[in-house]
């Protein structure tokens, strides 16, 4: 079992280097085809301009987005042309409100989408809907690469966050190629329910499922000793010297996480490790 079609989306060449390098490395490791989608983004809201200005401004913003897409496409072609992987590049223009749909149309035919972190300095507003488009409408797992890049194409130690939710199970299934190749996978359960059906063996059924796929599993049951579960996961990932974190994405609604915060958003903002997510 392996990934045979990888995809990355480039909207800003300033943050494209880590995911591009990771995409090439993984395409080599998995003997996969790499698809790069280079998008120019129209960020205007034309309904707010004075009467008569809409057409003129729309033409200019679309032309600018087209130039951005062509520049991004040329940058990616120059980068991928130096590699020995199979690849193709597509360019296009999208309005900010519609970019998630366009990404999803392409992503749904991929095995894995590789993207930069969506939050931080000099990060465009389009990076968040790109990730959400792949996860929610494309129904494909996403590997979010930190600024330091992907250290290993075959992570030796992986932390798998487990809360018995559908999202976490989807992530575990989607990450099987990584999990099967790892030396150790730590299933991490934070504050398991005291009265749940699996209270006597938290993570036990998941470990059985993974072991039948040849995954070498350990179960770590932790207490929530920090304000956020994401903080507990990141600290434990550093304690065990993990190379990757695997977890379900958006167990709560995206609106709730955007306003109140949540494990997904906190991990996307702060994780120092590659983050594999599925919904």
Image (tube, rainbow, N blue to C red):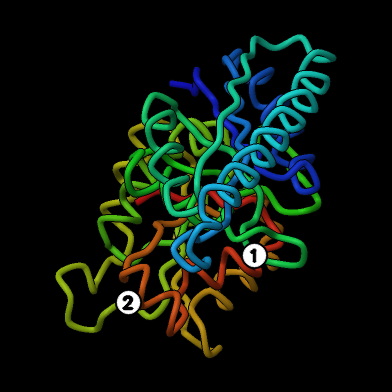
Going from N to C along the chain, the mark reached first, 1 or 2, is 1
Count of labels in the image? 2
Nearer to us in this view, 48 or 267: 48
Which residue has dot 2 on it?
A: 192
At 64% across and 14% down in the image, what residue appears? 87
Residue 85 percent location from the top left of the image: 70, 12
Residue 54 percent location from the top left of the image: 51, 54
Nearer to us in this view, 111 or 58: 58
- Where disc 2 sits, the SS reads loop
Foreground mark, 1 or 2?
Answer: 1
At 30% across and 57% down in the image, what residue appears? 204
Residue 38 percent location from the top left of the image: 63, 32
Establish if 78 lies above or below 209. above
At 64% across and 21% down in the image, what residue appears? 27
Please give left or right for residue 114 compared with residue 200 in the image: right
Which residue has dot 1 on it?
A: 119
- Where disc 1 sits, the SS reads loop
Residue 100 percent location from the top left of the image: 43, 46
Q: Which mark is residue 279?
A: none
Mark 1 closeness class: few <14, some 14–19, many ≥20 residues within 10 Å: some
């Amino acid at each position: 079992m392996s990934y045979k079609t990888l995809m990355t989306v480039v909207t800003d060449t300033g943050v494209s280097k880590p995911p591009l390098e990771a995409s090439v490395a993984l395409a080599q490791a998995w003997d996969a085809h790499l698809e790069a989608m280079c998008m120019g983004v129209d960020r205007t809201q034309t309904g707010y301009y004075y009467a008569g200005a809409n057409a003129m401004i729309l033409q200019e913003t679309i032309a600018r987005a087209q130039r951005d897409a062509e520049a991004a496409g040329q940058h990616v072609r120059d980068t991928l042309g130096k590699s020995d992987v199979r690849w193709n590049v597509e360019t296009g223009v999208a309005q900010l409100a519609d970019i998630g749909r366009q990404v999803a149309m392409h992503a749904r035919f991929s095995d894995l989408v590789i993207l930069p972190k969506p939050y931080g300095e000099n990060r465009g507003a389009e990076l968040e809907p790109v990730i959400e488009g792949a996860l929610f409408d494309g129904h494909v797992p996403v590997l979010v690469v930190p600024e330091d890049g992907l250290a290993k194409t075959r992570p030796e130690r992986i932390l798998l966050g487990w809360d018995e939710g559908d999202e976490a199970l989807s992530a575990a299934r989607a990450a099987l190629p990584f999990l099967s190749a790892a030396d150790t996978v730590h299933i991490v359960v934070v504050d398991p329910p005291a009265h749940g059906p699996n209270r006597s063996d938290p993570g036990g059924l998941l470990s059985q499922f993974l072991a039948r796929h040849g995954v070498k599993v350990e179960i770590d049951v932790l207490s929530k000793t920090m304000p956020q579960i994401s903080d507990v996961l990141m600290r434990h990932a550093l304690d065990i010297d993990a190379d990757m974190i695997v977890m379900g994405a958006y167990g709560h609604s995206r609106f709730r996480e955007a306003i109140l915060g949540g494990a997904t958003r906190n991990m996307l903002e702060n994780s120092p490790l590659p983050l594999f997510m599925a919904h």
